[in-house]
């Protein structure tokens, strides 16, 4: 064993969930509701992942009604009915949800390694104030977003797109205040232009500023989403290309570059965009927003073609997942898909096999690191879908403990029965 300092904190859990982002929270709550003794481990001091610390206030994507996503969405809805959620209050709401569901959780407790015996995960090593401790469980769910636990367990890791292996850029999301609502704009994506009274087009203004050096060259669009508060916008603009955060120094280089980019973007808004003359930063993400890092190979690799065709799977554990293939350009500004627009998909299923890793048993994949291609990942990574995947992963772990079978031996019909009993719709 790698660690000499081992303390078994408790006897054993049924399920350990690594990572308390949207997927991990959904997984932990679900497994607890199904009668499991659950431990949720989070490396930061706040739960929510991208949804809170990442300042990603726009919870996007669709899934068939009846999943835990509906419940969490209604808990998070902003009081005045605007689309953006309040990332600040989400911190408390999500913590209350976990406490109310009797999920045991540890904060400031990074998972540092996996405990694998004979090809089967039996727990994780986590860093606590007592040192590195072994925490044993019958099943482990990897909801770290980065596929960290799976990678440590020896699963096959995939990164980036075919050919050059590049990933989507990372970003720092932030909120500005002080916009004049009478004269300014919302810009949600590459097809959402605004024409100002003097005839200038917003998207063209962004592109010109990037070409002429008043915006970073790779920031060819400054997306501005409404939050729940008047005069505020969530800014999705900064982007760091050419890093995976898996290499030493990537996170630090990104932090330096993106904080500088924030200054440039704000100057552009103040000096060139009507209604933005007085904007200032209200809050920025507390951690780098990583769109794409490790993807873990499972028994099925979800492909873009499955999404484009709206494929239905016999072993579906998420039904009618719905979001475009949204690839922020790995080499420059805007979108990577042909024509510069996200590629349309049809509502599609996510099969149970995409959550079952190859080679390591009793581990369940969850959230954005499940088994799929670079292009497919660009769709199912959004938070509503991540939550539904989380619920599926929690259900898989619980059914496998209940039925005394390994994750590799799970009967998808038993998992589907449980999901349907929870209210999920898995067929039209
Ligand atoms: C810049 C940016 C903009 C985005 N915009 C949108 C958008 O507009 N709408 C949308 O719906 N989605 C958006 N997304 C995508 C979405 O936010 C994520 O894909 C989604 O949050 C994935 O959920 P998750 O639970 O799998 O991972 P995460 O939200 O990343 O959560 C993972 C959690 O695991 C924890 N963790 C990681 N490693 C460890 C460890 N070793 N030990 C313990 N804990 C660990 C992390 O701290 C985190 O809390 C965006 C993402 C980024 C980065």
Image: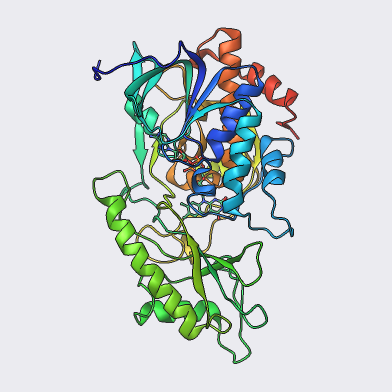
In this view, 257 is above or below 414: below
The colour style of the image is rainbow
Left or right: 90 in relation to 250: right
Left or right: 310 in relation to 254: right
Which quarter of the image is occupied by the C terminus? top right
- Where's residue 349, x and y in %? 62, 36
Residue drawn at 60 percent across, 32 percent down: 98
Residue drawn at 62 percent across, 80 percent down: 180
Left or right: 356 in relation to 186: left
Which quarter of the image is occupied by the N terminus? top left
In this view, 267 is above or below 406: below
Residue drawn at 66 percent across, 61 percent down: 228
In this view, 268 is above or below 375: below
Q: Residue furthest top?
A: 404
- Name the one closer to the observer, 142 or 89: 89
- Where's residue 315, x and y in %? 61, 25
Left or right: 92 in relation to 256: right
Q: Quadrant of residue 212?
A: bottom left
Is any part of residue 154 visible from this angle?
no
Residue drawn at 38 percent across, 74 percent down: 264
- Where's residue 182, x and y in %? 68, 81
Q: Residue furthest bottom?
A: 198
């Amino acid at each position: 064993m790698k660690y000499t300092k081992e303390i078994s904190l408790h006897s054993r859990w049924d399920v350990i969930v690594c990572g308390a982002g949207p997927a991990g929270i959904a997984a932990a709550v679900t497994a607890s509701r199904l009668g499991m003794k659950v431990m949720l481990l989070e490396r930061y001091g706040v739960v929510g992942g991208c949804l809170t610390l990442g300042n990603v206030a726009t919870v996007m994507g669709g899934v068939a009604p009846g999943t835990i996503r509906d419940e969490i969405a209604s808990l998070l809805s902003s009081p005045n009915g605007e689309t953006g959620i309040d990332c600040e209050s989400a911190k408390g709401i999500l913590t209350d949800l976990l406490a109310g569901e009797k999920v045991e959780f540890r904060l400031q407790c990074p998972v540092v390694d996996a405990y694998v015996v004979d090809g089967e995960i039996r727990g994780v090593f986590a860093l606590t104030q007592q040192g590195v401790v072994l925490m044993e469980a019958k099943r482990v769910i990897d909801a770290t977003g980065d596929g960290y636990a799976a990678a440590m367990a020896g699963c096959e890791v995939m990164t980036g797109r075919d050919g050059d292996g590049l990933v989507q850029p990372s970003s720092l999301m932030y909120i500005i205040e002080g916009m004049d609502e009478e004269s300014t704009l919302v810009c949600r994506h590459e097809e959402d232009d605004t024409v100002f009274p003097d005839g200038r087009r917003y998207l063209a203004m962004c592109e010109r500023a990037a070409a002429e050096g008043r915006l970073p060259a790779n920031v060819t669009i400054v997306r501005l989403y409404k939050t729940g508060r008047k005069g505020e916008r969530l800014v999705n603009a900064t982007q760091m290309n050419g890093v995976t955060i898996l290499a030493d120094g990537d996170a630090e280089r990104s932090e330096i570059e993106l904080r500088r980019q924030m200054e440039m973007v704000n100057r552009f808004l103040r000096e060139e965009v009507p209604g933005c003359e007085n904007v200032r930063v209200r809050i920025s993400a507390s951690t780098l927003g990583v769109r794409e890092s490790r993807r873990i190979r499972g028994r099925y690799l979800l492909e873009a073609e499955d999404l484009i065709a709206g494929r239905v799977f016999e072993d579906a554990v998420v039904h009618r997942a719905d979001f475009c293939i949204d690839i922020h350009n790995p080499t420059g500004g805007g979108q990577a898909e042909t024509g510069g627009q996200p590629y349309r998909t049809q509502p599609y299923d996510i099969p149970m096999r995409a959550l079952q890793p190859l080679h390591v048993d009793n581990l369940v994949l969850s959230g954005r690191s499940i088994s799929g291609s670079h292009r497919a990942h660009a769709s199912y990574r959004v938070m509503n879908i991540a939550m539904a995947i989380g619920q599926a992963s929690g259900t898989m772990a619980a059914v496998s403990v209940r039925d005394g079978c390994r994750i590799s031996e799970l009967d998808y019909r038993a998992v589907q029965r449980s999901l349907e009993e929870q209210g999920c719709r898995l067929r039209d």
